[in-house]
Amino acid sequence: MELLLAAVFVLGYAAIAFEHPIKINKAASALITGVLCWTILVIFGHGAHDITHELEEHMGELSGILFFLLGAMVIVELIDAHDGFQIITDRIKTDSPTKLLWMVGLITFFLSAALDNLTTTIVMISLLRKILSDQKDRLFFAGIIVVAANAGGAWSPLGDVTTTMLWIGNQVSAGSIVLKVFLPSLACLAVPLLYLNWTMKKNAPKLPQVDSSDEKSNTTAKERNIVFFLGVGGLLFVPVFKTLTHLPPFMGMLLSLGVLWVVTELLHHEKDDEEKSVLSVVHALRKIDAASVLFFLGILVAISALQSAGMLKELAVWLTETIGNENIIVVAIGLLSSIVDNVPLVAATQGMYSLEQYPTDHTFWEFLAYCAGTGGSALIIGSAAGVAAMGMEKIDFFWYLKKISLLALLGYFAGVAVYLLQVQILG
């Protein structure tokens, strides 16, 4: 059964990677792969009732992620409809690719720590569309946003779902993860940016930017400010809501969306239906990329099947028996997270190693938070941020592999070196 399950997953993964040559949307391939993986489990596994129950449990977790994603996308789309990002883009005016790279990279890095890498990617790519008019020019910057979002999320207990898992599981404390993982994460972004700064300066053309001064807006400055600050404030409120109530993050996201929905309805209630419709949440719901959400669902469903089959835990055990060295194992888990979702990998690792073996704030857990959070940048489908960017900007798998993957790996190993050096110096 496991061989058949692995074969189906690999074939599905290949269909996603070769989306453009075979001319089949990646969402369709992901959905079929996810359903087939669970079908194999039911047919060849033991106890259809138990397997169905496991699927329902997984879907409960996955629905939270999907609702979170939908809520974030609608809020960002609503801010965009009100030209809210103009508040930021009016202050980012440069035709220098290197300066723009640094600005976009650093803003993404710190914003990701406050929000999360997925939401930050959605926000920053939406913002990037307001700065650069040409989609081809945006591709490179979108790739850097993925790297920066994953690096920024790794050092914050709220920035990446795997770091949050380790924080909730008491493997790391909030203060320690910030202090110990910040510099490695910064190096993970700084090395690719420094390399690009050096290579792009030689013959970098000026970038054509969107001239927002000539654009007619459907909203007033007051309306833009209200929706922008309420929308961004709603996104920032999500981790606060989770901390206060201990409810899942998607509940805070839905609350923020509901409040913004009410405010925009009241804000535009005197306008005629045609003028009001393009500024409504209903219109924003129609504009979001639903195919990307379904792709995300299919991938997560397929991964959950591998997890239920015990294959991920078997892989982790094999790593321990074969490699032995804990640092090499963690680095390998980070690289594996670019192929297999980092959430079940970290969950399997938490199940393998106890707090008695590695107590809270042990270097093993901190290093795992860095590697699992940033390793996914090596491939476009290796992280939630990459999947979101792939859907929003139609990034080709092989384009990312050719243009961004090596830079992401350079940054990843730079962060690994910084962390290990830090441990040697500070203990």
Image (tube, grey):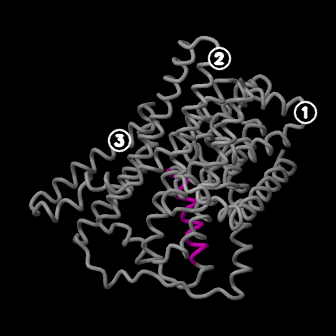
Contact (Cβ within 8 Å) of mark 2 with mark 3: no
Q: Which mark is residue 254?
A: 3
Q: Which residue is found at the position 27% from the left and 61% from the top?
A: 226
Q: Position of residue 181 (x, y in %)?
A: 70, 49
- SS at mark 2 in the image: loop
Q: Which residue is found at the position 36% from the left and 80% from the top?
A: 212
The quadrant of the rendering that contains the N terminus is top right
Q: Position of residue 228 (x, y in %)?
A: 33, 61
Q: Which mark is first along the chain, 1 or 3?
A: 3
Q: Main secondary structure of the magenta part?
A: helix
Label 2 vs label 3: CA separation? 37 Å
Q: For residue 306, which quarter of the picture?
A: top right
Write the start and end of the magenta stretch as one range. 100-115
Q: Position of residue 247 (x, y in %)?
A: 43, 31
User: How many neighbours does mark 2 have within 10 angstroms: few (below 14), some (14-19), or many (20 or more)?
Assistant: some
- Against 131, residue 27 (above or below) is above
In magenta segment, residue 104: yes
Q: Which mark is residue 45?
A: 2
User: How many neighbours does mark 3 have within 10 angstroms: few (below 14), some (14-19), or many (20 or more)?
Assistant: some
Q: Which residue is found at the position 73% from the left and 26% from the top?
A: 2
In magenta segment, residue 244: no
Q: Which residue is mark 1?
A: 322
Q: Who is closer to the viewer here, 402 or 66?
A: 402
Label 2 vs label 1: CA separation? 28 Å
- SS at mark 3 in the image: helix
- Against 241, residue 112 (above or below) is below
Q: Position of residue 344 (x, y in %)?
A: 65, 34
- Callout 3, which amino acid? Leu
- Callout 2, which amino acid? Gly
Q: Who is closer to the viewer here, 141 or 40?
A: 40
